[in-house]
Image (cartoon, rainbow, N blue to C red):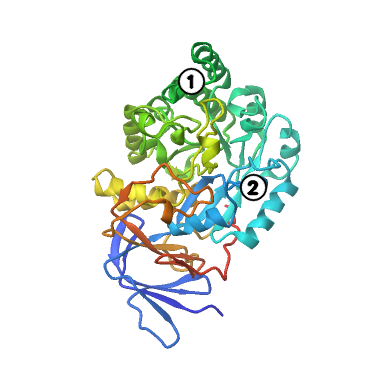
């Protein structure tokens, strides 16, 4: 039997309220919330002056396992995740091989069960080549299907650029369909224009003009219309433009929404002003765009047109990033610092603690229908993070946990620090130390 843990006197932030109470963790779950007497044999953690949040659920990561483990793997990146207060993640299908079959999906779950310190789930990849095979299965069993990252393997793999394939999927798929929304034909046209002018070494500041607002908006507009036509469950990944925010609604509770979206934290942390300073280190697809887009994304998050916050965590080696424009890999590591970034916005007066918890904990659990996750509730899994809102520290190479060993946030000073992280009632991260005897669990769907 696992040791019982009492977290004494933290300020709990949950479901729009903040209050001081003790929390008893036992058998993987929250057993009691309130004033709790300490009994012999229990481990006591002093939460006085700290804030206890539900564990962060990062619903879009690329942990590179299997096939690209020189960049990251399910052990190293989940270790970075729990140090950042992330207790659960959903990983994308662009591993090697691409996760395009049920068997390859099972293999990823098997790897994670041995390596991941956080809870885990995996999207099944879908494209024009395997759509018929996917639709012959019971798609309701999957956490979701996605094309994200598959365009790196072959051109033409983006669903948003294949309306016939997308329509077939929307008409028959019973799970969430999470898509990378850019119109590839527009991107290719823009690439040709800038290549003719600059050759292979296009200045990075043109990245948001190549992967343009129009390419994003046109793809998202078409996907939303098709999803509405078929009453499909569409989720647009990593939104980047003000124009796209107006395609989403905030007059329906999330539990009833069929069309949802997210913002990755870097898209309102950085803007095109940062390309001069950071260059290809902040090359993402879709691209970091303007200061106005950045501000509009935060506004849409606050008024509930955007439903959740993710990271699109995508580690590459520094050598892979520091290449000329067309050869530089897109993506960067963020999972260790997403909560810190959001808490900086709290300190700047842009967002409340309750809203951060809603968008990073409650809503991912609701959107993906995760069973007994995402809330500080009696009977729910004890996935929690204890945060000190007044503990300043600076990101350096020495405290990075990503296997790739770098971050676009190096040199950033945060006002807040994750002190402890609990996964399924187990203390896995404690003030810089890791307790690795237990591993995370597969996330399960709460079927209606």
* Closer to the eye: label 1 or 2: 1
From where the camera sits, is residue 235 visible? no
Q: Position of residue 177 (x, y in %)?
A: 59, 37
**In this rendering, position of residue 23 left or right of residue 95:** left
Task: Identify the residue position indicated by label 1 in the image.
Answer: 202
Above or below, comparing residue 274 to residue 96 in the picture: above
User: In the image shown, does 138 or 77 lie closer to the viewer?
Assistant: 77
Q: Residue at x 72, y 39 (%)?
A: 134
Percent across and percent down for residue 312 are 50, 42
Q: Nearer the viewer, residue 172 or 120?
A: 120
Q: Residue at x 30, y 48 (%)?
A: 344
Q: Secondary structure at mark 1?
A: loop
Labels 1 and 2: the sequence-earlier one: 2
Q: x and y percent of residue 297 in the render?
A: 36, 34
According to the picture, the residue beneath numbered tag 2 turns out to be: 142
Q: Which of 118 and 320 lies nearest the eye of the viewer?
A: 320
């Amino acid at each position: 039997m696992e040791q019982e843990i009492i977290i004494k006197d933290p300020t709990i932030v949950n479901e729009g309220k903040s209050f001081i109470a003790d929390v008893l963790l036992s058998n993987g779950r929250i057993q009691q919330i309130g004033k709790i007497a300490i009994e012999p044999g229990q481990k006591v953690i002093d939460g006085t002056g700290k804030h206890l949040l539900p564990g962060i659920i990062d619903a879009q990561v690329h942990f590179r396992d299997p096939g690209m483990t020189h960049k990251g793997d399910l052990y190293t990146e989940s270790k970075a995740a729990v140090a950042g207060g992330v207790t659960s993640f959903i990983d994308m299908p662009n591993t090697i091989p691409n996760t395009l079959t049920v068997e390859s999906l099972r293999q990823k779950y098997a790897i994670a069960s041995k390596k991941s310190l956080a809870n885990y789930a995996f999207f099944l990849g879908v494209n024009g080549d395997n759509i018929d095979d996917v639709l012959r299965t019971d798609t309701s069993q999957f956490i979701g299907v996605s094309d994200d990252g598959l365009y790196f393997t072959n051109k033409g793999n983006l669903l948003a650029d294949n309306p016939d394939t997308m329509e077939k999927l929307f008409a028959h798929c019973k799970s969430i369909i999470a898509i990378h929304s850019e119109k590839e034909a527009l991107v290719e046209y823009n690439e040709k224009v800038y290549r003719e002018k600059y050759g292979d070494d296009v200045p990075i500041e043109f990245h948001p003009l190549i992967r343009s607002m129009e390419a994003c908006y046109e793809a998202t507009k078409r996907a939303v219309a098709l999803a509405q036509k078929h009453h499909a469950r569409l989720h647009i990944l990593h939104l980047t433009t003000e124009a796209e925010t107006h395609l989403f609604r905030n007059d329906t509770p999330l539990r009833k929404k069929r069309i949802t979206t997210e913002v990755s934290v870097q898209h309102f942390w950085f803007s095109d002003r940062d390309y001069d300073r950071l260059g290809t280190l902040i090359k993402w697809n879709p691209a970091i765009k303007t200061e106005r887009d950045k501000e509009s994304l935060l506004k849409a998050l606050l008024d509930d047109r955007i439903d959740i916050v993710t990271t699109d965590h995508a580690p590459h080696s520094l050598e892979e990033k520091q290449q000329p424009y067309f050869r530089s890999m897109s993506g960067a590591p963020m999972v260790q610092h997403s909560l810190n970034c959001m808490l900086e916005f709290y300190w700047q007066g842009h967002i409340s603690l309750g809203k951060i918890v809603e968008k990073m904990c409650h809503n991912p659990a609701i959107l993906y229908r995760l069973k007994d996750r995402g809330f500080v509730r009696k009977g729910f899994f004890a996935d929690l993070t204890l945060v000190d809102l007044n503990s300043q520290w600076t990101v350096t190479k020495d405290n990075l946990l990503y296997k790739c060993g770098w971050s676009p946030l190096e040199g950033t000073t945060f006002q807040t620090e994750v002190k402890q992280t609990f996964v399924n009632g187990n203390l896995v991260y404690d003030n810089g130390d890791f307790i690795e005897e237990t591993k995370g669990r597969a996330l399960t769907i709460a079927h209606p």
